[in-house]
Amino acid sequence: MFTGIIEEIGKVEKVQRKRDGMLLSIEACGVLEDMKAGDSIAVDGVCLTVVEKGSENFQVEVGKETLKSTTFSSLKTGKEVNLERPLTLAGRLGGHIITGHVDGKGKIVEKEAGKEFGIKISYPPSFSRYLIKKGSIAVDGISLTVQEVEENFFHTYLISHTSTNTTLSKKKVGDEVNLEFDFLVKIFHKWWEEKKGKTDFRTLLDRAGFLSP
């Protein structure tokens, strides 16, 4: 699990394409502390496994299924990426719960200028039920708040601290981003889809105590 609070911006040193995926070497600094092979790390919001750690970099493998559903299919040497180590039980949950299992890709369609800026991002229509105004979404691993929801687009806003410490400030209109929709909203929808055919909504509210005098 992750929080969407980015710890560091890393840089892709090497991209090695393989038949069943790719091997990435990423230059980093702070996230290397206490890192060891077998650990998880979120790279642009994608949960990957560290296969090797060096003094100034680490290597991760990316499977072919991950390549299909993320922006990694177009990843190139020199690209900057957002990095976050997994949440610990002793840590603070400063953003929101993120699994690192990206749902799909979006595309930046509008972006304001400045250190603080609004941004408009497209999303796959099949995920519209997971977008809620003032709810959470992870964009390239960054925990952000949904400001407005339109058909096929959502709006969010970056404060100066977030834009300075993540890669979104350097993204351009037309660039793709990894999207992970709110884990808790997805759980609720799964529960609701299973329940709604068996019990009407008013009965569910009554059983939960919302209609009790």
Image (cartoon, rainbow, N blue to C red):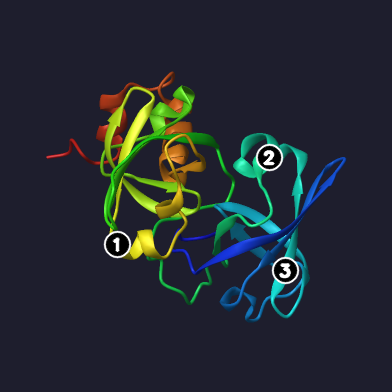
Residue denoted by label 1: 160
The number of numbered discs placed on residues in the rendered structure image is 3
Which picture quadrant has residue 78? bottom right
| Amino acid type at mark 1 | Ser
Task: Identify the residue at the far left of this view.
Answer: 213
Determine which of the numbered discs, if any, sits on residue 73 in the image.
2
Within-10-Å neighbours for mark 1: few <14, some 14–19, many 20+: few
Measured as percent of width and height from the top left, residue 115 is found at 29, 58
Q: Quadrant of the N terminus?
A: bottom right
Task: Identify the residue at the far right of this view.
Answer: 19
Q: Considering the numbered disc 1 on the image, is that residue within a helix, a strand or a loop?
A: helix
Determine which of the numbered discs, if any, sits on residue 58 in the image.
3
Q: Are marks 1 and 2 in contact (CB under 8 Å)?
A: no
Measured as percent of width and height from the top left, residue 163 is found at 36, 59
Q: Considering the numbered disc 2 on the image, is that residue within a helix, a strand or a loop?
A: helix
Q: Earlier in the sequence, mark 2 or mark 3?
A: 3
Which one is in front in this view, the residue at disc 1 or the one at disc 3? 1
Residue 127 lies left or right of residue 71; in this view the side is: left
